Amino acid sequence: MATFTISETDWARDAANLGTVRRAVFIDEQGVPDTLEWDEYDAVSTHWLALDGDGSPIGCARLLPDGHLGRMAVLPAWRGHGVGRALLDAVLHAARMRGDRLLRLSAQTHAAGFYARAGFMADGPAYEEAGIPHVAMQKTLI
């Protein structure tokens, strides 16, 4: 069984590790333009970082102050090992703890089933973002 840890962090402390995962997945793998990947929300968001047993970054996610989950990514070799679900669970827990009532996200359509299994519901038709089909999704937190 693959060993990994999830920790809450911030951009000032872990930009390099978070950026390693996001660059590999969004820019290199999916072709998202560099100019669209990095934004002003990184500095004001809460981030989560997944590290393998050797301490190398393998996944990440962020929660914006307005209750949007985003920039969730897992390196290809680690997909299917529970890293994405562990990241999502950590974000859901933190959002509940800070009193968020609703969590929103923009899911790539191929990942919509992953979020649906966690209780997210589609909220509108599919649309394109950074050249990739997405769907808005949300989950009420109780």
Image (cartoon, grey):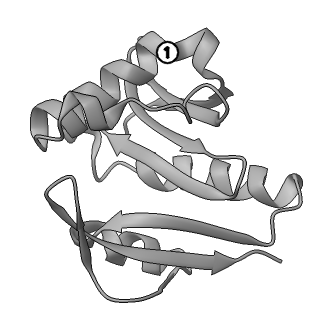
Instruction: Using the image, determine if residue 85 lies above or below residue 10.
Output: below
Query: x and y percent of residue 23 in the render?
Result: 25, 26
Residue 54 shown left or right of residue 40 in the figure: left
Instruction: Using the image, determine if residue 53 lies above or below residue 108.
Output: above
Query: x and y percent of residue 110 in the render?
Result: 21, 69
Q: Quadrant of residue 16?
A: top left
Residue 39 shown left or right of residue 129 in the figure: right
Task: Kindly tell me whether residue 97 is visible in this rendering.
Answer: yes
Nearer to us in this view, 35 or 106: 35
Q: Give the residue drawn at x 46%, y 79%.
A: 117
Label 1: which secondary element:
helix
Q: Give the residue drawn at x 13%, y 44%.
A: 30
Instruction: Using the image, determine if residue 63 lies above or below residue 137.
Output: above
For label 1, the residue is 15
Residue type for callout 1: Ala
Query: x and y percent of residue 115 in the render?
Result: 44, 71
Q: Give the residue drawn at x 13%, y 57%.
A: 131
Task: Kindly tell me whether residue 77 is visible in this rendering.
Answer: no
Query: Within 10 Å of the Cα at label 1, are there few (<14), some (14-19), or many (20+) other Cα atoms?
Result: some
Nearer to us in this view, 139 or 33: 33
Q: Give the residue drawn at x 25%, y 75%.
A: 127
Instruction: Using the image, determine if residue 69 lies above or below residue 133.
Output: above
Can you say which quadrant of the picture contains the N terminus?
A: top left
Nearer to us in this view, 125 or 1: 125
Query: x and y percent of residue 76 in the render?
Result: 19, 40
